[in-house]
Image (spheres, rainbow, N blue to C red):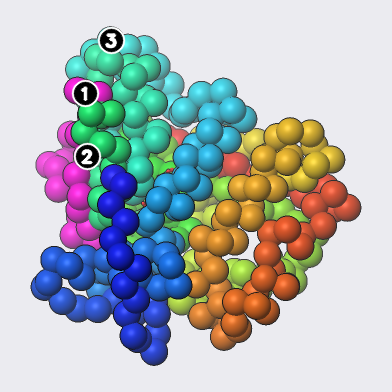
Amino acid sequence: MKNERSNREFDSSDPLKSVNSKNILDSFRYFKGRRYHNLTDVTYLFPNDDKEVERLHLQHNICRFVWKNNFSSPIHELLKSGNAKVLDIGCGAGHWIIDMAKEYPQATFVGIDMSPIFPDVKDIPSNVIFLQLNLNDGIPFPNETFDFVFQRFLCNCVVLEKWKFYVKEMIRVTIPGGWVEFFEFEIDHSDKQLIEAIHSGFKAKGINSSPETCVPQFLEKCQELSKVHYKEIYIPIGDWAGPLGTMMTTYVSMNFETVRLLLTSAWRIDDKTYDSGYDGHKFDFNATNTYLKSIRCMQ
Ligand SMILES: C[S@@+](CC[C@H](N)C(=O)[O-])C[C@H]1O[C@@H](n2cnc3c(N)ncnc32)[C@H](O)[C@@H]1O
């Protein structure tokens, strides 16, 4: 949805603090040219504007290119056969779900997100529905509704307790014998101090940014999953790795823009310091042979 409003900024001592208001005009908050959600009980701190949708789009294309498919669960035949129901929670702008719905026109797809950044109605296939909902209120479907429940890039942007709740909800709405699948990225860089600083910045905002919450050991500890399958692919970052590596450099630098407000606020530094020390362009990707680990877990 291309609905950028005027660049109204809240005068708040903490730009990440939501404004509790019933006024519909306050459903977003704006800071330094970026738009954010304005829900008081949600700790998700990435923007939800057109620039963010661009980043999500590139991210989706990278995933597709590298994995050569949209999922790893053994459900291709089921999705082809018709009547299968698929749920994507935290679906964002719906890039995954639209791709899937076109590939499997017989199946029905539901995407849930709190931010109304879904595609224009004319671009939504008839077998897709998007719902603007806060997952903290639970997934609004009865037990055992979906054959396949998918989640990508949410686990390391929310507080641990919420994440555990979302996982339980995902399992609750999956039919016995159905599949749940999780997808995450983890950066592997030789500058461990920097990686640690990023994690501690998220932690200062109450968020566990480590993808260990998306690996079999964690998911099995949620007690509802017992035989989680695991797959990983390393994606190179930097010109040394050809066109993909160059594209990944752009992607990483877009990520640093997405988390700018979160990290400058957590580290209590200004934008200039952020740019000089932590901008993606400053990484020496070529010298370090950096990779992004992409992880899929499914059961
Ligand atoms: C990093 S984006 C990933 C989007 C999408 N899964 C993708 O792969 O392109 C995470 C999404 O989760 C959504 N989200 C975060 N907390 C949420 C909540 N409590 N309820 C609903 N959606 C939420 C955000 O609005 C955002 O669109």
Q: Which mark is residue 127?
A: 1
Q: Which residues are magenta?
A: 125-147
Where 16 sits versus 238, above or below? Answer: below
Residue type beneath disc 3: Ser
Please indicate whether residue 243 sits to the left or right of residue 80 in the image: right
Where 133 sits versus 38, above or below? Answer: above
Q: Residue at x 32, y 56 (%)?
A: 4
Task: State if disc 1 and disc 3 touch (CB < 8 Å).
Answer: no
Which quarter of the figure is the N terminus placed in?
Answer: top left
Q: Residue at x 20, y 53 (%)?
A: 133
Q: Relative to the observer, which residue lies in front, 227 or 233?
A: 233
**Marks 1 and 2, how far apart in space?**
10 Å
Q: Relative to the observer, which residue lies in front, 15 or 127?
A: 15
User: Mark 3 or mark 1, which has the lower sequence index?
Assistant: 3
Q: Please tell me how crowded label 3 is: few (under 14), some (14-19), or many (20+) other residues with Cα within 10 Å.
A: few
Which quarter of the figure is the C terminus placed in?
Answer: top left
- Which mark lies nearer to you, 2 or 3? 2
x, y percent for residue 268: 57, 85
x, y percent for residue 15: 40, 80
Give yes or no for residue 229 being in the magenta stretch.
no
Q: Label 3: which residue?
A: 81
- Which mark lies nearer to you, 3 or 1? 1
x, y percent for residue 130: 22, 39
Q: Is residue 76 visible?
A: yes
On whether ligand 1 comes within 8 Å of the CB at mark 1, the answer is no
* SS type, badge 2: strand
Give yes or no for residue 143 being in the magenta stretch.
yes
Task: State if disc 2 and disc 1 touch (CB < 8 Å).
Answer: no
Residue type beneath disc 2: Phe
Q: Label 2: which residue?
A: 130
How many numbered markers are drawn?
Answer: 3
